[in-house]
């Protein structure tokens, strides 16, 4: 059955909605430790490899994403993320921009964890997609 939804034959019993995430966290810990897995996930959301092959990241973005994901009281708002990451002055524009920034970082994290689809980058052919879209 689906996580958090009871089965047809057991109407009052359901798996906790966070059970799937807990199982994934346990698998990450079993497969080599949580610190390395967490570091790789944060890098996937807020980092890149530069021309010299050095792994670099945006500490502001990483901090905002982590705060948005784990702080349950006095957490960072979408407007605060939008204000930090864009030039918008209006609250509604900042909220929308913050939502887009957070969604993109989380999508990159989901691709890293293989929860969302992604294509492998191939130097010889992948850049051509930009040329194809422009036509």
Image (cartoon, grey):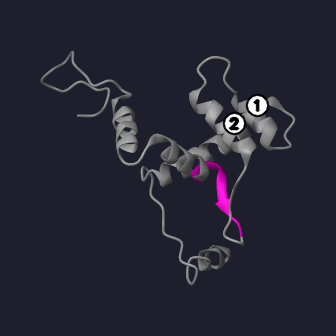
Question: What is the magenta range?
Answer: 44-50
Nearer to us in this view, 88 or 25: 25
Q: Residue at x 49, y 54 (%)?
A: 111
Asked if residue 80 shows in the view, the reply is: yes
Q: Nearer the viewer, residue 88 or 63?
A: 63
Toward the left, the furthest residue is 9
Residue 8's place in the image compared with 61, above or below, is: above
- Residue 104 placement (x, y as % from top left): 61, 48
Residue drawn at x 71%, y 43% is 61
User: What's the CA distance linking mark 2 and mark 1?
Assistant: 9 Å
Residue 69: quadrant of the picture: top right
Look at the image and tell me in which quarter the C terminus lies.
Answer: bottom right
Residue 129: percent from left, percent from top: 59, 75
Please give left or right for residue 83 compared with residue 1 in the image. right
Q: Are marks 2 and 1 in contact (CB under 8 Å)?
A: yes
Nearer-N-terminus badge (2/1): 2
Q: Is residue 27 left or right of residue 54?
A: left
On residue 112, which mark appears? none
Is residue 107 in view from this perspective?
A: no
> Which quarter of the rendered picture does the N terminus lie within?
top left
In the picture of the structure, the residue carrying the numbered disc 2 is 64
Q: Nearer the viewer, mark 2 or mark 1?
A: 2
Q: Position of residue 113 (x, y in %)?
A: 45, 50
* Residue at figure coordinates x 57%, y 84% from the top left: 124
Query: Of 90 and 105, which appears nearest the observer?
Result: 105
Q: Tell me, yes or no, whether the highlighted magenta stretch contains residue 46.
A: yes
**Which residue matches tag 1?**
80
Look at the numbered disc 2 and give the secondary structure of its residue.
Answer: helix
């Amino acid at each position: 059955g689906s996580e958090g939804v009871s089965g047809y034959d057991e109407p009052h019993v359901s798996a906790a909605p966070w059970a799937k995430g807990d199982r994934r966290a346990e698998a990450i810990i079993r497969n080599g430790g949580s610190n390395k897995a967490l570091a790789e996930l944060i890098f996937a959301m807020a980092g890149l490899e530069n021309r010299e092959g050095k792994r670099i990241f945006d500490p502001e973005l990483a901090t905002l994403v982590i705060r948005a994901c784990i702080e349950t009281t006095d957490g960072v708002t979408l407007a605060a993320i939008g204000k930090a990451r864009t030039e918008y002055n209006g609250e509604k524009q900042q909220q929308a921009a913050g939502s887009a920034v957070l969604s993109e970082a989380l999508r990159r994290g989901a691709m890293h964890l293989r929860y969302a689809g992604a294509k492998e980058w191939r130097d010889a052919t992948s850049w051509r997609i930009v040329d194809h879209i422009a036509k």
